[in-house]
Structures are given as structure tokens and as C-alpha cells.
Amino acid sequence: MDVIALVGPSGTGKSHRALIIAHKHNADAIIDDGILIRDGKIVAGHSAKQEPSKIMAVRRAIFVLPGHAEEVRKAIAAENPHRILVLGTSENMVHKITRALKLPAISKIIHIEDIATKADIEKAQFYRLKQGKHIIPVPTIELKPHFSGFLIDPLQSFFKRSATKRRRLGEKSIVRPVFSYYGTLSIDDHAVAAIVRRVVREAGISEVSHIKVQHLYKGNEDMGLKISCSVVLTYGNHIPTLITKTQKAVRQAVEYMTGMVVHEVDIVVKALYVQA
């Protein structure tokens, strides 16, 4: 199995050109925004465009939500495609996707700037920003069961079969999700610390301080977070049970609200408050 990738910023026309690129490079499967597509059908996965927020959409697109990668891996093994085209906003993203799905290393990366003119990219960004239009490279009739309630319009493109020279139709669909991919999203460490402080206090802990948010890197890639803090407990609680419960709550809250992976939550009990 071979893997190639199409890379470009959000809203620059990657999904619009996906079918043409797949045909040109003999890719018989596409991975785009969390779904595996083959022969114009969604074979497995869940589209990031169905998520209620951009944060959850990003997590869906890179296959870090529970069970998502496993489902698509099983489908890939069953389908056994000759070549897969992976779409992503950056080289880092497509490499993350291939690792999550345990695919072979990417043999070729195509950048959107190499196949689209500046005017084409600006036009695509206009439709994304001003009209909120997102494209999914599957036919409308196939997409409707997966996108109930979304505005859906068909698009058509033709390309020749090399053997018969006959034109084959490739249909795409336009959807309007409830969020927009356009732009960038940055979450400051102070925001993460505020989430930790709130969750720890809600767990019944008297005082929390010295909250530290550390990013774990592998080369230039941010692999996730390591969080640490100090707390003061009230006498009477079973300390191991309370701390374990709090660690789990902090991890779940930070991952849900930020989309970042939390590898460690270290809590130091620095004092025990005894009421008079």
C-alpha cells in the first residue's frame, strides 16, 4: 500500500481537487476530514464537518477521538486500497494522520500551491470565509444519510479514463457546517491553567496553586501537555481516591475543551487543612 498527501491551508480548495488528484496519481482511496472514501462512498469514519466546534473538528480530523482511528484502520485493512490520498492543512497534520492510522510513510506530498493558481486559491477562500461552504468529495446521494440537516449541493467534474478514453463523472458535495475552519486557533497556557483551577476546586479541594502547563515536543511537533499543580486538602478525605478522581477530571476537561492531548497530570499535596 502506498500513501500520498495533498497539503494546503484550510479553505484553499484541497477537497475540491481531491478527486482529480486521486485519479491523476492512481489513488483508489481518500482520507479527508476524518472519513475514508472509496469509489464515491464513505467507507468508514465520521466527518469532522459534523462536529459542533472547531476544536472537536480538529480532533476528529486527526483521528484522536476514542475508537475513530481503530474503525478506519479496520476498514482500510478490509478494503486494501492500492494507494491512499491523505488531505491535510500541513505536512505535520498528514504525518499525524498516517501515524494514527498506522499507514506506511508518505511517499509523495503535493502542495496546493503547485496545482492551483493564486486566483483559484483566493476564490476558494472567499467561498469558505464569506459563504461558509465546505466541499466533501463524495456524491450528494451518498452524503445525505451522514449529513441530515445540512445544506447540501452537488458539484460535478469529469476526467478521462486512460484505457477507454471515456469521461467518468466524479461528484462532490457542498455542506455548511456549524463552524468555520477559516483562520487560526491558539489557546494560551493561562487558559489551560484556568481550566485546571476550576476543575480542581469543583472536585472539593480547598486550595490549588503553582499550576504549570508544559508542552512535550518531538522535534518541532507538539505532542501534548504535561500538567502539574500543588493542592491543600481538607482533613477527612481519602487522599489517593480524591487525587486520582481529580487527575482524571482535569485530563478529561482539558482534552475536551482544548483538543490537546494530556499525557500527565501531576498533583502534589503540600498541606492538609484541619478544621478547628
Image (cartoon, grey):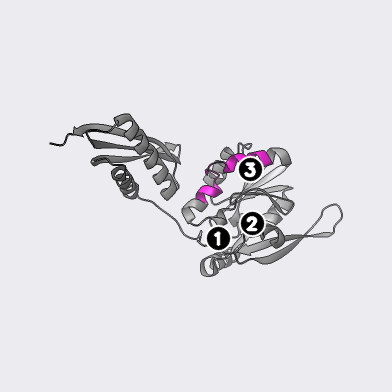
Closest to the observer: 140 or 33? 140
Tell me residue 159's x, y (percent). 77, 59
Looking at the image, do the residues carrying marks 2 and 3 touch, with CB atoms under 8 Å apart?
Answer: no
Mark 2 lies on residue: 146
Mark found first going from the N terminus, 3 or 1: 1
Residues at marks 3 and 1 touching, judged by CB atoms closer than 8 Å: no
- Is 205 situated left or right of 57 in this image? left
Judged from this view, the residue extending furthest toward the bottom is 130
Q: Main secondary structure of the magenta part?
A: helix
User: Toward the viewer: 260 or 232?
Assistant: 232
User: Which span of residues is magenta-colored?
Assistant: 58-75
Whether residue 59 appears in magenta in the rendering, the answer is: yes
Quadrant housing residue 213? top left
Q: Say which residue label 3 marks.
A: 72
Disc 2 residue type (three-letter):
His
Q: Which residue is mark 1?
A: 11
Above or below residue 237? Residue 53 is: below
